[in-house]
Amino acid sequence: MDGSIKVLILGSIALDTIQTPFGKKENLLGGSATYAAVVVSFFTKPGIVSIIGTDFPSRYYNFLKKRSIGLEGVVKKGKTFRWSGLYEYDMNVAKTLRTELNCLEVFDPILPDKYKGVPYVLLGNMHPLQQERVLEQVIDPKFVVMDTMNLWIEHTREDLIKLIKKVDLLLLNDGEARQLFGEVNLVRVAKKALRLGPRFVVIKKGEHGALLFTKDYVFSVPGYPLEEVVDPTGCGDTFAGGLLGYISSKGVSTESIKKGIVFGSICASFNAEGFGLSKLKRIKREDISRRYKEFQKLVKF
Ligand code: AMP
C-alpha cells in the first residue's frame, strides 16, 4: 500500500464516558471518526478529517497513528469534544447524558490537498453543514456514505435533507429513520429516503441486523448473535467502517454493497463485545474473515 488514503472519514474524535449495566468508564478514546477509522484500517488506509483539543492525550493520538490512520486532516485547537452516554438493559438505545461539543462546534473542516482526490468518503456523525463542507472539497468521489444522529435530526433537519440528496448511501438506525421521515413503517421510511436521491438506504436495527433498500430490491442481514454485549458505543460507526472498508477494497457493485453490509454487521458485533475500543484493538483481519464464514452458515438455508 502506498501512503495515499482510500477512505476519507469525517467525524468526531472524542473522550467518552460510558455507563452500562456492566460498569462505567471515563475518558475513553471514542468518537464517530475514531471507531470508523479503526475498522476501515482492517481493509485499507483511512484518513480522518476532524479536530481534537490541546488536552487530547498523546497516547490516544499515537494509537491512531500506529494503526496507519492518516491524521493530516486532524486539527488541534481548544478543548476536545466530550460525550457521555448511558445504556440500560435495552442496549440498543443509547441515552445521551451530556454532549460537550467544545472544539467541534467551531470546526471548519479543510481537506489537505492530498485528500481531495479520495475515491471513498464517509460523512460520519457531525453537523450536516460540516459534512457538506467536506463533500464539496472532494473532487470526484466514487461513493459517498452519510451517517447522522438524533441531535442533528432535531436541530438541523433542513440541512440534513439537502445533503441526503447528494450522497450515494444513507445510513440511519431505525429510530432515527422514523424520526427523520415522520413515519413508523420502515419500508415506507426507506421509500421516502430513496425519493430524495440516494441509490442506497441502509436502516440498522441494533442487535436485530440491518436492511438495505434500493429502488429495485431489498436485502436483509441479521445481527450476529452475541452471547455477551458489553458496550454498544460505536456500533453505528464500526458498521459504517466495515461497510465502506469492504466496498473500497472491492469496488462498487451490488455484490460488494451486500457483502459490505455483512462486514459492517460483523465489525459492529466485535465492537459490542468490549468497552470502548478494547475488543477492536485485540482482533485481527483473520478474526473478521472467520466470523464472516460463520455468518454465511447462519443465513444459509
Ligand atoms: P455510535 O456509533 O452511534 O454508537 O456513536 C458513538 C460515538 O459517537 C461516541 O464515541 C461519541 O463520541 C460520538 N458522538 C456522540 N454524539 C456525537 C455528536 N453530536 N457529534 C459527533 N459525534 C458524536
Image (cartoon, grey):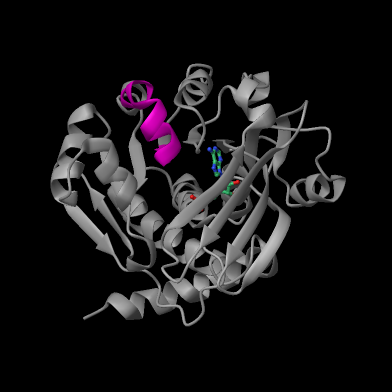
| Residue range corresponding to the magenta coloring | 146-161
Quadrant for ligand 1 reads top right
Residue 271 sits in quarter: bottom right
Front residue (pair 30, 238): 30
Position in image of residue 29 (x %, y %): 71, 52
Is the residue 103 above or below the residue 219 in the image?
Answer: above
Residue 287 can be seen, yes or no? yes
Using the rendered image of the protein, determine whether residue 50 is visible from the camera's viewpoint. no
Name the chief secondary structure element in magenta: helix
Query: What residue appears at the point 17 percent right and 49 percent down from the top-left corner?
Result: 184
Quadrant occupied by the N terminus: top right
In terms of image quadrants, where is residue 251? top left
Is the residue 237 above or below the residue 291 in the image?
above
Would you say residue 148 sits in the magenta stretch?
Answer: yes
Using the image as rendered, state which of residue 97 and residue 146 is in the foreground: 97
Outermost residue on the right side: it is 58
